[in-house]
Image (spheres, grey):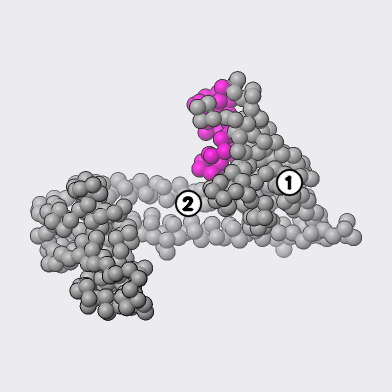
Amino acid sequence: MSRIAELIEELCPNGVMHLSMGATGTFTRGSGIQKKDFLEQGFPAIHYGQIFTRYGLWASETYIFVDEAVAGKSKLAQPGDVVIATTSENDEDLAKAVAWIGNSPVAVSSDAMIYSPENLNPKFVSYFLNSADFQKQKEKFITGTKVKRISSQNFSKIKIPVPPLKIQEEIVRILDRFTLLEAELEAELEARRKQYAYLSENIFSSIENGKNTSLGSIVSTVSTGATPRAGEKKYYENGEIPWLRTGEIQFRDIYCSKTKITQNAVNDYRLKMVPENSVVVAISGATAARSAVLKSKMVTNQHCCCLQVNPSIAYYKYVFYWLKKDYLVLKSKGRGARSDLNTKIIKEHPILLPPLDEQKRIADLLDKFDALVNDISSGLPAEIAARRKQYEYYRDQLLTFKELQPEAA
């Protein structure tokens, strides 16, 4: 039997009380701390916007401070209180909370409220406010369209389980371990990303015996595509041929496009199938100058420049990483009001080519780092996602209690 189960059997075998948050604590609205009041030193303060962007589920230090005079006019959260954001741009983030476990009071801005709990561990409250049960209860109390809001009056109606403090503390201890593990993985991922960025920036500058040439000299074919007329059923209905649009070019391997077209579209627009391992560069729009590698055959729209790399001269993945490195340089060559590129600009873009085996070595090394820091099916992002899913499962399980019935009280 787990420690939690033992404690429940010992302390509350018949269930725990589920009380409204208004019955388990008091709510106080924050007051008008503005960004112009922020200081690097002074009286510690929490601004509601930073609850979304900078804080986790608890904090013992603040990121901003205010003058003593401003603090004197502000509402203060005491150690053990929970600071809750009362406005948000979406339902999910609304009521994101941070338990204040610092040693002194902290000033709280407007668009936030201070919850002062009784017989509740502040971290336990913060974990609960992040749970599936709370999210479900919260839904019926959300108001607003563009800006979502929840009032303290409605918040006070939400029910929270109130197990004995000993059980709350054990739950917090377990969930803290999950949170710490995720934070350690996030820190490692950030360190690896910096290492990857450094490697990507410098690996090409260390090339010896390289030959300066242009992209046009290392490709066997350069092509673009077309866009079949929108709304024409014969071009899209029951389509089976992948058709790549410029917006899908995002510095990655592309295994399949989101849209499929018919053979009629291919025939009428004389589209050429672009073979796998081609390097594609966006030539207009928001993704202009971004590149990708096709891992299967497909056709493209007219804003994709498709480079079929000559394998006897260059390794396609090396070309991709070179273009990724040169993204801003290539983008700066855009012309016209939209700063569009064209095939001529891309073909004339310079590239430094070492021997083929060295190209492959560089590309393979960058592939490994890219998978480590970006691949959602492997590497650190996958491990973080798995740990987060595990944490969410155990959090919701640990915060679910049989409700104590009146006759059992």
Mark 2 belongs to which amino acid?
Answer: Leu
Q: Earlier in the sequence, mark 1 or mark 2?
A: 1
Residue at 65% in and 38% down: 113
Q: Does residue 44 show up magenta in the picture?
A: yes
Q: Is residue 205 left or right of residue 367?
A: left
Residue at 56% in and 41% down: 51
Q: Which residues are magenta?
A: 38-67
Q: Is residue 392 left or right of residue 330?
A: right
Q: Which mark is residue 279?
A: none
Q: Nearer the viewer, residue 275 or 208?
A: 275
In the rendered image, which quarter contains the C terminus? bottom right
Residue labelled with disc 2: 185
Q: Is residue 172 visible?
A: no
- Pinpoint residue 188: horizontal percent, then vertical percent: 43, 49
Residue at 47% in and 59% down: 383
**Between tags 1 and 2, which lies in front?**
1
Residue labelled with disc 1: 156
Mark 1 belongs to which amino acid?
Answer: Ser
